[in-house]
């Protein structure tokens, strides 16, 4: 007897959720020119999520390695108390970022062959947004830490302000503009879905 999670619905008996068609799932009525079923769309979107996870995880691992190596440098002993606290917060944030980036993979393993890939894709999307937010904080924190240690607090503040502005433009404003342009070019029934 299979155990059903309260968070992940299992497809009803006799219904293969992996073979949904647009008429089976009202949320999958997009006519984007791709001749694919809901299952094929879920597979394609899951592959996209996995590719994004690979990129994100690589960057996170590099930052984590950099942070961990710092503790073993002779100059680490010269850090002030607040700098050490900031460093430990960055290490913790780095670990949290890795956990967020790996969460979709862990969920996929837990519900493998349960016919809930569209749910896993939505979960993966949300986890990636959370992981990207954590990476933005991590990047700003690492830059602030390095500028603070090397140059001083004033330079750290300026560097973080510039970095946050660049992140907001490239990660928030630019995509929002492109989404709006894309939505404006689609018929009304097809907006906002991929």
Image (cartoon, rainbow, N blue to C red):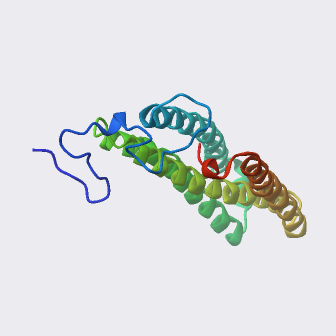
Residue that sits furthest to the left in the current view: 1
Q: Is residue 78 above or below residue 52?
A: below
Figure check: 105 above or below 166: above
- Residue 170 visible in the current orientation: yes
Could you tell me which quadrant the C terminus lies in? top right
Residue 105 position, x and y percent, is 43, 41
Instruction: Give the residue at the far top of this rendering.
Output: 35
Decide which of 171, 176 is in the foreground and name it. 176
Horizontal arrangement in the rendering, residue 170 relative to residue 77 (left or right): right
- Would you say 144 lies left or right of 158 here? left
Where does residue 152 sit, x and y in percent of width and height? 87, 65
Residue depicted at x 63% and y 36%: 55
Q: Which residue lies at the image location 89% right of the left edge and 69% below the top edge?
A: 154
Q: Nearer the viewer, residue 177 or 152?
A: 177
- Residue at horizontal 53 percent and vertical 54 percent from the top: 126
Q: How many marks?
A: 0
From the top left corner, tell me how far across and down residue 181 is, in percent: 79, 49
Toward the viewer: 2 or 107?
Answer: 2
Quarter of the figure with residue 60: top right
Q: Left or right: where does residue 142 sit relative to residue 27?
A: right
The answer to whether residue 95 shows anywhere in this view is no
Question: Residue 149, image x and y in percent?
Answer: 80, 60
User: In percent of the image, x 54 and y 39: which residue is there?
Assistant: 49
């Amino acid at each position: 007897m299979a155990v059903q999670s309260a968070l992940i619905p299992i497809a009803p008996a006799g219904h293969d959720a992996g073979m949904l068609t647009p008429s089976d799932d009202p949320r999958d009525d997009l006519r984007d020119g791709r001749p694919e079923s809901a299952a094929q769309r879920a597979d394609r979107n899951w592959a996209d999520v996995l590719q994004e996870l690979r990129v994100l995880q690589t960057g996170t691992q590099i930052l984590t390695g950099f942070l961990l190596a710092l503790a073993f440098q002779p100059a680490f002993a010269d850090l002030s108390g607040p700098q050490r606290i900031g460093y430990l917060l960055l290490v913790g944030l780095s670990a949290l970022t890795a956990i967020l980036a790996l969460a979709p993979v862990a969920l996929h393993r837990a519900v493998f062959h349960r016919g809930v890939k569209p749910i896993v894709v939505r979960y993966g999307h949300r986890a990636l947004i959370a992981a990207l937010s954590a990476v933005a904080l991590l990047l700003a924190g690492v830059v602030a830490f390095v500028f603070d240690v090397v140059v001083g607090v004033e330079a750290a503040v300026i560097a973080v302000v510039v970095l946050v502005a660049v992140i907001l433009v490239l990660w928030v404003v630019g995509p929002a503009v492109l989404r709006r342009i894309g939505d404006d070019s689609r018929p009304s029934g097809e907006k906002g879905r991929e």
